[in-house]
């Protein structure tokens, strides 16, 4: 079985099922509950591989009366084998993406849920830096920037969700005379959380277009 669901589709599926569970908790009208269930199934079905026993069992599970939070979490877990995980990069591959960084802090691979990652992001708190590895034009690129230790409530440029964000400053142009052009964007402090909120890959691509170094 070849995984076909992307990480951002997986986040979307998760959000949809959470919305359904929340509806069951807050809406008494059975008619409205039926409508929300029908909408959820309509939104999810195109993202799941056809003729796949996991899909069949999952869709059956979603239809359970008053699906609970725990049942929903268990159901979502069953889809993990169908999700394309973020590639685990060797230290060498990673260093190649950040050639200019002298002492690169590596991510803690053991704590990452690769099936939840559309992009990889980690903080080097001591040096107030954030590193990102993300797909861009059919390859992975590495972006580094200064990451403010200050957290504010605001809109994240990557996942387009309101949450705890910090200012990410990247150098987009360096001239021979030692002058820089910098670009600042507010993005989620916690990249794992950001990925769980990321259901549309376009803002990420736009973000990468503005922050990546220009020749
Ligand atoms: Zn975000």
Image: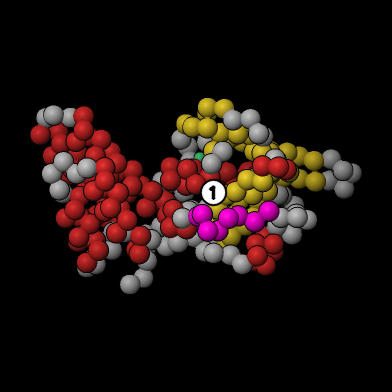
Please identify the dominant SS of the magenta region: loop
Residue 209 at least partly seen: no
Label 1 element class: helix
Tell me which residue sits at (59%, 30%) in the image: 151
Residue 109 is one of the magenta-drawn residues: yes
Which residue occupies the foreground of this view, 75 or 84? Answer: 75
Q: Is residue 173 left or right of residue 162?
A: right
In the image, residue 128 above or below residue 115? above
Tell me which residue sits at (55%, 53%) in the image: 120
The answer to which image quadrant residue 39 occupies is top left
The type of colouring in the image is secondary structure
Tell me which residue sits at (36%, 70%) in the image: 2
Residue 67 at least partly seen: yes
Q: Residue furthest bottom?
A: 1
In the rendered image, residue 81, in percent from the top left (x then y), is placed at 35, 64
In the image, residue 119 above or below residue 1? above
Residue at numbered disc 1:
205
Query: Would you call the spot at circle 1 few (<14 residues within 10 Å), some (14-19), or many (20 or more)?
Result: some
The answer to which image quadrant residue 165 occupies is top right
Which residue occupies the foreground of this view, 129 or 175? Answer: 129
In the rendered image, residue 24, in percent from the top left (x then y), is placed at 19, 36
Q: Residue furthest top?
A: 153
Q: Is residue 14 left or right of residue 144?
A: left
In the rendered image, residue 93, in percent from the top left (x then y), is placed at 64, 66
Q: Is residue 181 left or right of residue 87?
A: right
In the rendered image, residue 122, in percent from the top left (x then y), is placed at 60, 48
* Quadrant, the N terminus: bottom left
Magenta segment boundaries in residue numbering:
105-112
Circle count: 1
Residue 111 is one of the magenta-drawn residues: yes
Tell me which residue sits at (47%, 31%) in the image: 162
Q: Is residue 86 left or right of residue 82?
A: right
């Amino acid at each position: 079985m070849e995984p076909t669901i992307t990480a951002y589709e997986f986040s979307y599926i998760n959000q949809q099922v959470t919305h359904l569970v929340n509806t069951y908790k807050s809406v008494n009208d059975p008619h409205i509950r039926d409508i929300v269930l029908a909408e959820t199934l309509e939104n999810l079905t195109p993202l799941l591989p056809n003729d796949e026993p996991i899909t069949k069992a999952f869709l059956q599970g979603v239809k359970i009366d008053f699906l609970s939070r725990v049942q929903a979490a268990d159901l979502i877990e069953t889809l993990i084998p169908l999700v394309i995980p973020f590639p685990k990069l060797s230290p060498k591959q990673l260093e190649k993406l950040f050639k200019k960084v002298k002492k690169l802090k590596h991510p803690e691979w053991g704590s990452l849920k690769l099936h939840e990652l559309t992009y990889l992001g980690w903080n080097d708190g001591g040096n107030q830096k954030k590193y990102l590895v993300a797909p861009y034009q059919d390859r992975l690129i590495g972006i580094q920037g200064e990451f403010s230790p200050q957290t504010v409530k605001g809109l994240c440029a990557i996942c387009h969700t309101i949450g705890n964000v910090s200012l990410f400053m990247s150098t987009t142009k360096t001239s021979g005379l030692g002058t820089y052009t910098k670009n600042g964007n507010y993005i989620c402090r916690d990249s794992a959380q950001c990925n769980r909120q990321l259901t549309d890959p376009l803002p990420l691509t736009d973000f990468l277009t503005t922050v990546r170094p220009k020749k």
